[in-house]
Image (tube, helix red, strand yellow):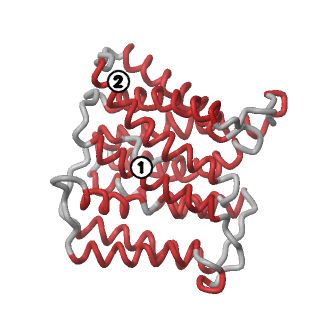
Amino acid sequence: MRSKIWLALLALYIVWGSTYLGIKIAIETIPPFFHGGIRFLISGLILIIWQRAAGQSMPTGKQWISTAIIGSLLLLGGNGLVAWAEQFIPSGIAALIIASVPMFLVIGEAIRPNGVKPNWQGIVGLLIGFVGIFILVGPAEFSGGGTKLNPLGVAALLAACLFWATGSIYSKSADLPKSSLMNTGAQMLTGSISLFIISFVTGELNGWEISAVSARSLYGLSYLIFVGSLVGFVSYGWLLQNAPISLVSTYAYVNPVVAVLLGVWFGNETLEPRMWIATAIIIGSVIFINSTRPKVKYEAKEVVEGAS
């Protein structure tokens, strides 16, 4: 059993760490919101059909509303903005900024009614973490980096963190399906509808032709659907049932490092010293926050949170 756990955990590290590069490749010739709609429509349908065949009941009307809200927050506001931002921001840097989602969760918990307030260690961890983000995305004269990052792209990634945190906090009290995979499938399906709506409203399909889609982008999209979404979430769901949550949660610390390395090796992205410094600070602060904050139980039903 132990070897199976470590193999599944390694798969989770690689799969979810690689999705940022997969997104970068997919959106080379496919509009970002539209690519997300296709990805989560297919993934969601597969999961729902699979779970129905396994005997799981379909979501109730109230549960569909809850999954639609969460799916829109996480997959449109979260993943959709990540895809949009990666038009301008290297995938490794995008992964590092998204790694700060637990920091936004702490803030969201603190300001919501009856939320859990951070202790002094959590506040120190937040301050350190935001210093790491500033080193990563701040002006070159302050951060010491040679690469100028698109401010709109950075703003979109920070907004994605906020949407992810909001969706995760909402899901804690929402009426959701008991099956984590049925819940995930419903979130993907409803989230894909939101992504398609925004794709059409923003006009990103104007002038785009399906014939312009490259084989490389199709490979990237297929990888996101069948490996990033399905293999990743199935591995995560299995680990939640068979491994300590403290061990499973380490994916949030490892994935950004995997994303940075893959971006350098396969995406021709630049690896500057400030990236490693920021990586150590951001991930270190998240580990510190998670180890010292008052325990808030986020159940397995939140499987979409934090993943791209």
- Residue 51 seen anywhere in this rendered image of the structure: yes
Quadrant showing the N terminus: top left
* Furthest residue in direction left, as rendered: 114
> Could you say which is closer to the camera, residue 196 or residue 245?
196
Where residue 269 appears, x then y in whole percent? 72, 64
Look at 53% across and 79% down and name the residue there.
Answer: 277
Badge 2 crowding class, 10 Å Cα cut-off, few under 14, some 14 to 19, many 20 or more, is: many
Where residue 150 appears, x then y in whole percent? 67, 64
- 224 lies above or below 161: above
Q: What secondary structure is marked by label 1?
A: helix
* Location of residue 302 (image quadrant): top left
Badge 1 crowding class, 10 Å Cα cut-off, few under 14, some 14 to 19, many 20 or more, is: many
Q: Which numbered marker is on residue 64? A: 2
Look at 52% across and 61% down and name the residue there.
Answer: 256
> Could you say which is closer to the camera, residue 258 or residue 194?
194
- 240 lies above or below 100: above
* Furthest residue in direction right, as rendered: 211
Q: What secondary structure is marked by label 2?
A: helix
Total numbered labels placed on residues in the image: 2
Measure the alpha-carbon separation of dots 2 and 1: 19 Å
Where residue 95 appears, x then y in whole percent? 54, 59
Q: What residue does disc 1 label?
A: 164
> Could you say which is closer to the camera, residue 271 or residue 250?
271
Where residue 77 appears, x then y in whole percent? 49, 44
* Location of residue 291 (image quadrant): bottom left
Q: Amino acid at mark 2?
A: Trp
Look at 22% across and 40% down and name the residue there.
Answer: 173
Look at 68% across and 49% down and name the residue there.
Answer: 24
- Residue 225 seen anywhere in this rendered image of the structure: no
